Image (tube, rainbow, N blue to C red):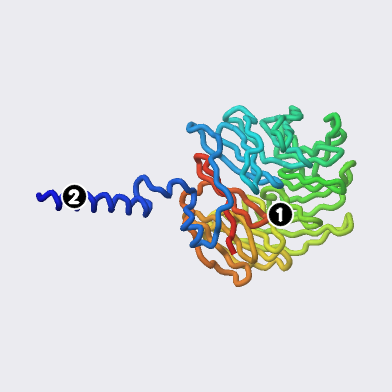
Amino acid sequence: MPTKLKCRLVFLTWLLVLCAAGRGYGATASSRWLVTPELLEEGKLEILWEDKLPIQKTEELESMSIVGERIYALSSRNYMICLDRNKGKTIFSRSVAAAGLPVGRLVPYEDELMFVLGNRLVEMNGQTGKELRAKTIEIGLACPGARNSSFYYLSGKDRRLHVLHAENGVEFFEVAVENDPMITSIAADEDFVVFGTDAGNVVSILPDRPRRLWQFDAGGAIAGPIVREGRSLFFASKDTNIYRVDVFNLPVKELVWKYQTAGVPETSPHVTQKVVYQYIRGKGVTAIDRESGKGIWSLGEGVELLAEAKGKSYVISKNGTLAVMDNVRGKKLYSVNFRQVKRYAVNTADSKIYIADKSGRIACVQPAD
């Protein structure tokens, strides 16, 4: 073969390799990104920051949650990394429990976080990660607790709500519901305490005495935590309904609306200023108008709300895309390829979208328009 022809073949082969790399085949340049800038641009999104969490190759990123202005990321070995959610800067990182021990949902109170660890109630400083207090509950804990300035409210596996003094952890009183159900979620403030049960009861009591203010009975177990927004309570029941109950002047309550879903909810709704979002296994995500209780749209492949902005919802789907939904016209506008995204956090406060992969590569993106 002539030397000149050989040179041309070598050049063409080299050129094809470069082109393939640029299009994402093999060891690609796009592997730098969780979602490439080109895909973000197509989806009218822009990247604010991206980073790699300090977790080992032998572990995975297990979960992410947003509390105030921070992201708390937890690895499969219970190593926690706290980030400033606006800038992506690490605030602290430390092990919070032995590997394999389930860490309960983080419950905020002022600048502290409370979570259940086995039969222990643990409180840590949300800014430093330092453990402040830990109390062993001999009867065991059935769900995450709650607190206000004066008391802790804990659901024991003995089917009682236990109220403890915040200053010394000494029990003050306990409460049980007449039909003796398990208490599965608790919310508390300075005015009243509300808790849900696996029999469908939603009960409100005074914060400092075992006096019932009101009780609402749904047809099935309360799924997940009760969501409080001002004087409105939003909750899902296994009777297939989502409820909004308003509490104006204690002890008066009002059922504002209930919305029947296409299946049995297993998690609590997510609530924004105008929309309530509910996931149903096998049926996807449904958006409900917060004021009227009427359905806006349903996305069968939807898995979770990630954020909302200017009348649009950003929903991660089971087929590896981010679906952009129009909350005004009630339809899907377009989708973005998010196939590398395996972990995410729900953000109901603003338009920022927090995504990650299992190795701990994490990014924050937001709508560009």
Q: Residues within 10 Å of mark 2 (few under 14, many from 20)?
A: few
Q: Quadrant of residue 101?
A: top right
- Numbered disc in front, either 2 or 1: 2
Question: Residue 96 appears in which quarter of the rendering?
Answer: top right
Q: Nearer the viewer, residue 40 or 266?
A: 40
Q: Which residue is mark 2?
A: 7
Q: Position of residue 318 (x, y in %)?
A: 50, 54
* 60, 86: nearer the viewer: 86
| Amino acid type, label 1 | Phe
Quadrant location of the C terminus in the rendered image = bottom right
Judging from the image, what secondary structure is the residue with disc 1 in? strand
| Residue that numbered label 1 is attached to | 235
Disc 2 or 1, which lies upstream in sequence? Answer: 2
Mark drawn on residue 190:
none
Q: Position of residue 331 (x, y in %)?
A: 56, 69
Question: Which residue appears farthest toward the bottom when viewing the image?
Answer: 329
Q: Residue furthest left?
A: 1
- Image position, residue 172 (x, y; %): 87, 34
- Vertical comparison of 364 with 129: above or below: below
Dot 1 crowding, Cα within 10 Å, few <14, some 14–19, many 20+ = many
Residue farthest along the front direction in this orientation: 4
Element carrying mark 2: helix
Residue 361 point in image, percent of width and height? 52, 43
The answer to which of 263 and 227 lies nearer the viewer is 227
